[in-house]
């Protein structure tokens, strides 16, 4: 229909906004976000980074807050969009 956007345009716009917010993350939070995007759980992230699972959970929570995301899937979408859009190297 003329004048109406596709139903998923709002979702994509939200992911793009989160991708642009990645600069707010510390280097450790960016690492965690990339591991989340790779599908790792908090215990797996903890092992990869040699930190406690509690610290990994805290980092994931910080990433969610900074990106104004509500799920790990939204973190992953932001990372992927940032990579394909050139926001991340």
Image (spheres, helix red, strand yellow):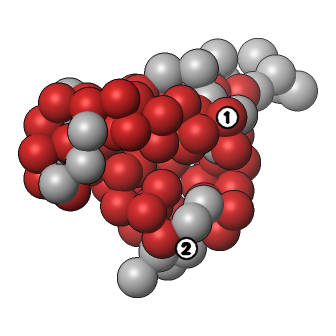
- Outermost residue to the bottom: 89
Q: Are marks 2 and 1 in contact (CB under 8 Å)?
A: no
Dot 2 falls on a residue whose secondary structure is loop
Q: On the image, which quarter does residue 31 sit in? A: bottom left
Q: Can residue 82 be seen in this snapshot?
A: yes
Up the image or down, 49 lies above or below 66; here it is below
Number of residues whose C-alpha sits closer than 10 Å to that of mark 1, classed few (under 14), some (14–19) or many (20 or more)? few
Q: Is residue 40 left or right of residue 78?
A: left
Quarter of the figure with the C terminus = bottom left
Residue at position x 47%, y 42% from top? 59
Q: Can residue 15 be seen in this snapshot?
A: no
* Viewer-nearest residue: 73 or 63: 63
Up the image or down, 48 lies above or below 89; here it is above
* Viewer-nearest residue: 59 or 24: 59
The picture places residue 26, in percent across and down from the top left corner, at 57, 66
The picture places residue 35, in percent across and down from the top left corner, at 26, 49
Q: Is residue 86 left or right of residue 37?
A: right
Please name the residue that numbered disc 1 is placed on: 65
Tell which tag, 2 or 1, sits nearer the viewer: 1
Nearest to N terminus: mark 2 or mark 1: 1
Q: Which mark is residue 42?
A: none
Quarter of the figure with the N terminus = top right
Please name the residue that numbered disc 2 is placed on: 87
Q: Is residue 64 left or right of residue 37?
A: right
Dot 1 falls on a residue whose secondary structure is helix
Residue at position x 82%, y 22% from top? 4
Up the image or down, 72 lies above or below 37; here it is above
Label 2, label 1: how far apart the Cα atoms are: 19 Å
The picture places residue 14, in percent across and down from the top left corner, at 68, 36
């Amino acid at each position: 229909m003329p004048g109406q956007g596709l139903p998923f345009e709002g979702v994509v716009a939200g992911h793009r906004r989160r991708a642009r917010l990645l600069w707010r993350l510390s280097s450790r939070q960016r690492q965690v976000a990339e591991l989340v995007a790779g599908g790792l759980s908090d215990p797996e992230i903890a092992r990869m980074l040699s930190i406690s699972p509690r610290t990994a959970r805290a980092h994931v929570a910080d990433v969610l807050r900074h990106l104004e995301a509500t799920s790990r899937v939204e973190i992953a979408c932001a990372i992927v969009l940032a990579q394909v859009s050139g926001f991340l190297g």
